[in-house]
Image (cartoon, helix red, strand yellow):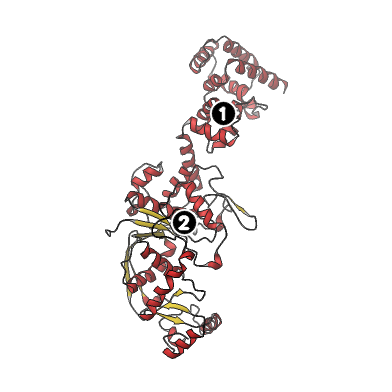
């Protein structure tokens, strides 16, 4: 580990909505910074203007804010290393590219797109389908390595379009130690001469990324595995400039639930679950669902993401963001791809819901329903129903009978439990309820047990039908708590209504 102050960045491209894999990358950077008293910043990498999608940058910032992943520096946040949008830093990059040309570490290439395509076609015809612009082919192409100095200066003076390419040395082993993967060794004979500066006056990702990381004093680059093939070039660029490279950590891929391939943006909704943190609507009006709008707690979403590729080394599974910050270390991040499990995601959501106070749940629900409920009453409903709910709205859907009388009665319970003698038994139990003065959960349960003992009845002869009359359901939370919540008068009226309705059927 180097001794520089920890500074990490999440550097998304505004080419569409932020995939949950991107959120995980941002999360790991955030947690690493927090754990090491460092700085976490956001940088928008929009060097590829052809793929720019309006609204994508705003979506990224909004999604991260919902997740609670708060950068210290970034667009709209300020910071001494800004601006934090690459297109606003355009003037910075060309001098660095020109420096490499002057030092014979890069070169001007004047080949047109048509000429390069023709080369590729010729290579295919010769049985070489993977033609590259590299240390071999560059000797026969139109660039500053094959042209004379006068020819190059003339082309530049005429404004002939050009790109600047990295001059990869022959047969050199590039070595670097990845925090997650250990030592990585790649020979330059397997690499092409990547474009560093484009003919449109913009740097490519590779050059801008390295220059910005250097200027922003980034100490650790924590990014997805898909960037691992680019790492050797980035190491070469650091060497070329004479800069100390940051430490690299390449995160494992997020895989589909069956493990068959990377979980991609295109999988959104197609596999029955969101792959985006929040809703995204395309320019054509097509909606892709997000976890926020599906009713997930942001903490549950973040907790789930943290475990996709990392584990704390303990049996603890439920963490707050603060607890994750304390527990997180890169040495417990796996090399292997992490299979996404939608059922486990719901499990995290259920646990977060159950661990949220009744009052807070009631407040959230009431806010979503224009404050139409009595908040104290709703808090009790949340307490009764949250063990059986996955999402906040389930409390009202599954517990609707707590706030209004049932209109229908579960036919399966009637078929299995409602016998000829049931009306007489329930009427007697109703009369016993009416005599209870101290109408509490404990007294109702005590009287119920006495009632069963006196009549030599099993609990299954009475309780399911008692539940049926009060709730219309065959299952649910404690009937004695439900009865206490409804109150004596409401219980008696519901029992009368149920006895009459079921008898009529």
Q: Nearer the viewer, residue 494 or 465?
A: 494
| Location of the C terminus (image quadrant) | top right
Q: Is residue 167 at all visible to an observer of this figure? A: no
Q: Is residue 372 above or below residue 5?
A: above
Within 10 Å of disc 1 (Cα), the crowding (few <14, some 14-19, many 20+) is few
What residue is pinned by disc 2?
Answer: 75
Secondary structure, mark 1, is: loop
Q: CA distance from mark 2 to mark 1?
A: 52 Å
Task: List x then y, in percent, for residue 457.
Answer: 55, 15
Task: List x then y, in percent, for residue 137.
Answer: 44, 84
Give the residue drawn at x 47%, y 46%: 301
Q: How many marks?
A: 2
Q: Is residue 170 above or below residue 19?
A: below
Give the residue drawn at x 59%, y 26%: 402
Task: List x then y, in percent, for residue 244.
Answer: 30, 67
Kindly check if marks 2 and 1 are in contact, taking CB atoms under 8 A apart as contact. no
Give the residue drawn at x 53%, y 47%: 291
Q: Which mark is residue 160?
A: none
Q: Which mark is residue 475?
A: 1
Secondary structure, mark 2, is: loop
Q: Earlier in the sequence, mark 2 or mark 1?
A: 2
């Amino acid at each position: 580990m180097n001794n520089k102050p920890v500074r990490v960045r999440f550097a998304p491209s505004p080419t569409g909505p932020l995939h949950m894999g991107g959120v995980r990358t941002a999360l790991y950077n955030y947690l690493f910074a927090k754990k090491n008293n460092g700085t976490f910043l956001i940088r928008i990498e929009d060097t590829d203007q052809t793929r720019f999608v309006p609204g994508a940058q705003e979506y990224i910032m909004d999604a991260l804010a919902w997740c609670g992943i708060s950068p210290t520096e970034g667009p709209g946040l300020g910071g001494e290393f800004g601006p934090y949008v690459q297109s606003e830093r355009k003037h910075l990059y060309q001098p660095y590219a020109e420096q490499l040309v002057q030092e014979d570490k890069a070169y001007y290439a004047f080949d047109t797109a048509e000429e390069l395509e023709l080369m590729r076609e010729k290579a295919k015809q010769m049985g070489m389908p993977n033609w590259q612009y590299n240390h071999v082919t560059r000797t026969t192409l139109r660039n500053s390595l094959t042209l004379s100095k006068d020819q190059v200066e003339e082309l530049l003076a005429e404004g002939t379009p050009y790109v600047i390419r990295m001059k990869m040395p022959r047969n050199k082993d590039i070595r670097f130690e990845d925090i997650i993967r250990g030592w990585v060794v790649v020979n330059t004979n397997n690499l092409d001469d990547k474009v560093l500066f484009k003919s449109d006056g913009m740097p490519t990702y590779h050059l801008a990324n390295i220059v910005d990381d250097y200027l922003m004093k980034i100490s650790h680059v924590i990014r997805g595995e898909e960037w691992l093939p680019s790492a050797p070039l980035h190491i070469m660029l650091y060497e070329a400039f004479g800069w100390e490279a940051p430490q690299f950590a390449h995160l494992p891929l997020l895989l589909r639930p069956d493990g068959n391939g990377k979980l991609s943006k295109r999988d959104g909704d197609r596999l029955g679950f969101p792959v985006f943190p929040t809703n995204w609507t395309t320019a054509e009006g097509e909606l892709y669902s997000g976890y926020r709008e599906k009713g997930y707690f942001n903490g549950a979403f973040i907790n789930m993401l943290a475990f996709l590729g990392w584990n704390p080394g303990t049996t603890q599974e439920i963490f707050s963001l603060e607890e994750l910050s304390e527990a997180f270390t890169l040495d417990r991040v796996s090399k292997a791809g992490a299979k996404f499990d939608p059922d486990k995601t719901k499990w995290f959501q259920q646990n977060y819901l159950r661990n949220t106070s009744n009052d807070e749940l009631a407040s959230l629900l009431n806010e979503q329903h224009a404050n139409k409920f009595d908040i104290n009453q709703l808090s009790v409903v949340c307490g009764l129903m949250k063990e059986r709910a996955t999402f906040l709205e389930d409390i009202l859907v599954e517990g609707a009978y707590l706030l209004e009388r049932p209109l229908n009665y579960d036919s399966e319970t009637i078929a299995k439990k409602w016998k000829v003698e049931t009306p007489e038994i329930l009427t007697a139990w109703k009369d016993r309820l009416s005599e209870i003065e101290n109408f509490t959960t404990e007294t109702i349960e005590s009287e119920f047990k006495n009632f069963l003992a006196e009549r030599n009845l099993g609990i299954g002869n009475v309780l399911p039908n008692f539940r049926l009359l009060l709730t219309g359901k065959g299952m649910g939370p404690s009937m004695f708590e439900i009865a206490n919540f409804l109150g004596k008068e409401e219980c008696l009226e519901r029992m009368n209504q149920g006895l009459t309705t079921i008898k009529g059927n």
